[in-house]
Image (spheres, rainbow, N blue to C red):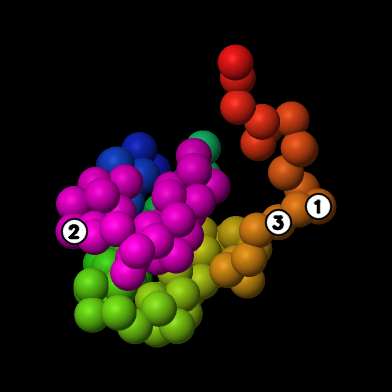
Amino acid sequence: MSGTVVKLTLLTSAFMFATPAAYADCQSEMRILADDLAGVKLNSYQSQSLADKVLQARRQCWVHREQAAMDLINSARRIAGLKESSGEFDWENVPLESLEEEQ
């Protein structure tokens, strides 16, 4: 499974089973994970392990288990060699200009 396929799977998973407020944090973290995976090279074992963690995280989001989902998302991030997410917005590394709406 290539990085592009994993990213597409993550994005599809994030949107397919969503309801407005209950899954906002899980969805956001899965979208961030998908963005962070862009360009990351994974071997077959890593891809399969990552896909399994994402599927489990999606299931935990579905049953409103935010902490369990975050644990699985962070496990997926470790598999890909990415920094773990705290679940909070990273004000230090996101330029304010990127948050402003274009008019």
Q: Mark 3 to mark 2: distance in Å?
A: 26 Å
Q: What residue span does the magenta drawing correspond to? A: 11-38
Q: Which residue is drawn at 81% across and 52% down?
A: 92
- Kindly tell me whether residue 97 is visible in this rendering: yes
Instruction: Give the side of residue 86 with respect to residue 61, left or right.
Output: right
Q: Name the residue under label 1.
A: 92
Q: Residues within 10 Å of mark 2 (few under 14, many from 20)?
A: few
The question of residue 19 being in magenta is answered with: yes
Q: Mark 3 to mark 1: distance in Å?
A: 6 Å
Q: Name the residue under label 2.
A: 17
Q: Earlier in the sequence, mark 3 or mark 2?
A: 2
> Foreground: 28 or 53?
28
- Kindly tell me whether residue 84 is visible in this rendering: no
Relative to 64, say whether 73 is above or below: above
Secondary structure under tag 3 reads loop
Q: Are marks 3 and 1 in contact (CB under 8 Å)?
A: yes
Relative to 91, say whether 55 is above or below: below
- Residue 87 in the image: state x and y as whole percent: 57, 68
Q: Residue at x 27, y 68 (%)?
A: 58
Give amino acid for label 3.
Asp
User: What is the chief secondary structure element of the magenta stretch?
Assistant: helix
Q: How crowded is mark 3: few (under 14 residues within 10 Å), some or many (20 or more)?
A: few
Give amino acid for label 1.
Glu
Q: Mark 1 to mark 2: distance in Å?
A: 31 Å
Secondary structure under tag 1 reads loop
